[in-house]
Amino acid sequence: MIVAGKKYDVDELVKSIDISSHSFEKVGNLMLTKSEIAILKRNLIEYSCASSLKDLMIKIKEVLDDEFLDPDDANDLEYVLESISERDYYENTKK
């Protein structure tokens, strides 16, 4: 396949997708992906003692308020925050 003048091998692209990092693990009362857990661990956020996704979001926001936080870590944490915020919304919205 050619995109914007560059040739891509679709089979190789599919093989390189890391599906396991997006699989969920139960942590206490929470369901988090392996990649979310890795980001939280790297930023020393105590996710295992969070009682809810809202509680975890508060913990993440506290770390994001740190003015000395590395910009790359901030981007990763904002991704996690957005992801669990959406999950919290859909889990707690009446059907």
Image: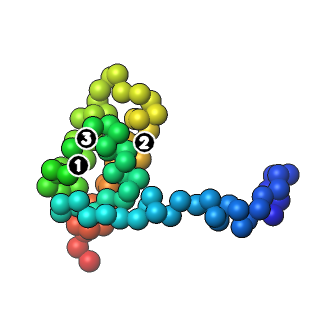
Q: Front-most of 86 and 49?
A: 49
Above or below, 90 against 39 in this view is below
How crowded pointer 1 is (Cα within 10 Å; few <14, some 14-19, many 20+) is rated as: many
How crowded pointer 3 is (Cα within 10 Å; few <14, some 14-19, many 20+) is rated as: some
Above or below, 21 against 43 in this view is below
The percent coordinates of residue 26 (x first, y second) are 26, 64
- The residue type indicated by label 1 comes to Tyr
Furthest residue in direction bottom, as rendered = 95
- The residue type indicated by label 2 comes to Asp
Q: CA distance from mark 3 to mark 2?
A: 13 Å
Select label 2 or label 1 by which is in front. Answer: 1
The percent coordinates of residue 32 (x first, y second) are 31, 59
Local SS, label 3: loop
Visible in this render: residue 86?
no
Q: Front-most of 51 and 83?
A: 51
- The residue type indicated by label 3 comes to Ile
Q: Front-most of 26 and 88?
A: 26
Give the residue displayed 71% in from the left and 67% down from the top: 11
Q: Decide: marks 3, 1 in contact (CB < 8 A)?
A: yes
Circle 2 residue? 76
Q: In this rendering, would 42 be left or right of 48?
A: right
Q: CA distance from mark 2 to mark 1?
A: 15 Å
Q: CA distance from mark 3 to mark 1?
A: 6 Å
The percent coordinates of residue 94 (x first, y second) are 23, 73
Local SS, label 1: helix
Q: In this rendering, would 74 be left or right of 4?
A: left
Give the residue displayed 34% in from the left and 22% down from the top: 68
Q: Quadrant of residue 52?
A: bottom left
Circle 3 residue? 45
Visible in this render: residue 41?
yes
Circle 1 residue? 47
